[in-house]
Amino acid sequence: MKSLFARKSQKPILERCRKDQSSLMRQKYAPWYHSMDAQRKTRVEMNGRDMVMLTSNDYVGLTFHPKVIEAGKMALDKWGSSTTGARPANGSRRYHIELEEALASFLNKEACQVSSAGYISCATGIASFAQRGDVILADKSLHSSLWDGIRLSHASMERFSHNSAKSLRSELELLDPKVAKLLAIEGVFSMEGHISPLPELLDVSDEFGCFVVMDDAHGLGVLGKDGRGTASHFDVEDRVDILVGSLSKSLSSTGGFVAGDRESIEYLRTHSKQTIFSAALCPSQAACAKMALQIMQEEPEHRERLWANTKRYKNMLLDLKLDTWGSETPAVPVVLGSKERAYVFWKSLLEKGVFTVMSIAPGVPPGKDLIRTAISASHTAEDFEIIAEAFAYAVKKL
Ligand SMILES: Cc1ncc(COP(=O)(O)O)c(C=O)c1O
């Protein structure tokens, strides 16, 4: 019988895993996959230390809202922990329909389909509608879930410059006018914090007959009336065909959604492999998201605090002359320009009790290595004192 080593060495994929430089470096410097031992709102405990969380997507700060927690508990009691099945089979429940109706109405759309992850909804929001022979026009800075959706669709793809209606037009002018086209964009770009110039992009896309799919994972809860998102912010809700997004940010849950007109969502229910063959959103997560949606409309003070906190934080970064890549939202990158500088900065913040996340090329364009930070309505004056001290220290350390 061959030894275990001999058997392993004959497997090129195992060999690749063992020697992968990125994995070896990640484990050596350990900037990611930190496990937290406890959490209360913006405070987390790591290795026995109390830290300020400065990179969560809990923009509206509802993850510890008593009504959200109560709703989750009640759903667990009523429906159990999981449906253990997919929506077209045994997995559909009344709470899915209720959440879908609430989301559709909030987003000014006729219909909605929820799934167990934003990643699934965003990918399927493209993959289900575009097909071989179509062309997808994609902003260069899209989220990974949308790139995967593009690949799964088998359509061909043309990239255009980030947030550039001019570049979009140049690409469209080269295409066969008869071919079906899909425009894939984001409302708020999660890494850069940029808001899409939506009216300009829509003017161009309407001219060329593009079906528009917009991921508003980071616009929902943050922009627009009551947090209805980027399309509401620009008053163009009826011009975006499909809105995709996540329940894991302002809606303080886990899961995703696709919203649009009734025919498109029925088409999605028929053709979306990613949701047809995946278990449905679980009861507690659906209930938390639905309650968060209600609170967002009933308690505007959270969003007001979010923007006041964002202003305060950005002023602090400005005083320190840090580069925030022109962020216009509570998602705020601090661009440091090289992975070495980003690492030093990230580590210094950690030393001073502030948890952020580092993002380096190729995850960001070369020279844009950064730490990603995000502001929540839950950040307190005391948090900001710790943050200010930590940033001043990190700047010195550079
Ligand atoms: C822009 C964008 N789209 C989609 C997703 C996926 O959402 P989820 O984390 O709910 O799977 C994310 C989350 O990172 C995101 O930032």
Image (cartoon, rainbow, N blue to C red):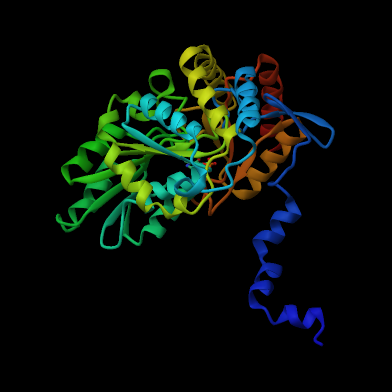
* Residue 252 makes an appearance in the image: yes
Position of 272 relative to 36 (above/below): below
Horizontally, is 282 left or right of 207 in the view? right
Q: Nearer the viewer, residue 183 or 81?
A: 81
Residue at 67% from the left image edge and 64% from the top image edge: 21
- Residue furthest right in the image: 48
Position of 254 relative to 307 (above/below): below
Tally the numbered discs: 0
Residue at 36% from the left image edge and 53% from the top image edge: 271
Q: Position of residue 267 (x, y in %)?
A: 31, 47
Q: Nearer the viewer, residue 398 or 16?
A: 16
Q: Position of residue 286 (x, y in %)?
A: 54, 32
Q: Position of residue 249 (x, y in %)?
A: 54, 32
Horizontally, is 108 left or right of 76 in the view? left
Position of 72 relative to 128 (above/below): above
Q: Position of residue 34 (x, y in %)?
A: 73, 43
